[in-house]
Amino acid sequence: MIVACSHVTLTSTDVPRSMRFLETFLGIAPRYQNAEFGEFVLNSGFRVAVFAVLGKTRDYFNAEGERGTLALGVTTRDVDGTYAVLHAQQEQLGLKFSGPPKSHPWGEKSFLLIDPDGNRWEIAQAPSPSHGMLVDRE
């Protein structure tokens, strides 16, 4: 049985570009990086990796494939500040936004982002200051 969600692995046609975006986006330095692979480790231990599709991985991955069917959700302590930092570098990083952060009735405030490789991200304000996960509001 699965016990935790440990990591996400994203394909890229330009790993160094994706790593620049993720370093700005995540606000941390990569744990490892070269021209074909890079990885970040969040405080929670969750890993975000990026790789170029080479060799046998071509049988399983397509770096230029459609990415509009899934969004990766992350939380931040300051969604407005995160939006401001990323929006200021929109052209330099090749980002697209749904608009500024919006409050939702289930307790989150968030915005949507499309990264340089076409991955969709939902960036939400951490509703719980201790762990960043959605809490029961009842």
Image (cartoon, grey):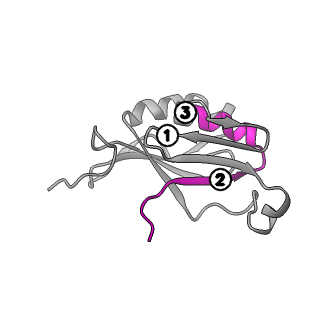
Residue where numbered disc 3 is placed: 86
Residue type at tag 3: Leu
Q: Position of residue 112 (x, y in %)?
A: 49, 48
Residue type at tag 2: Leu
**Quadrant position of residue 20:** top right
Residue at 27% over, 55% down: 106
**In which quadrant of the rendered image does the C terminus lie?**
bottom left
Residue at 52% over, 28% down: 85
Residue where numbered disc 2 is placed: 10
SS of the residue at dot 3?
A: helix
Q: Position of residue 91 (x, y in %)?
A: 67, 33
Residue where numbered disc 1 is placed: 42
Q: Earlier in the sequence, mark 1 or mark 2?
A: 2
Q: Is residue 122 above or below residue 19?
A: below
Which of the two discs, 3 and 2, sits closer to the camera?
Answer: 2
- For disc 3, the neighbor class at 10 Å (few under 14, some 14 to 19, many from 20) is some
117 relative position to 130: left or right: right
Q: Earlier in the sequence, mark 3 or mark 2?
A: 2
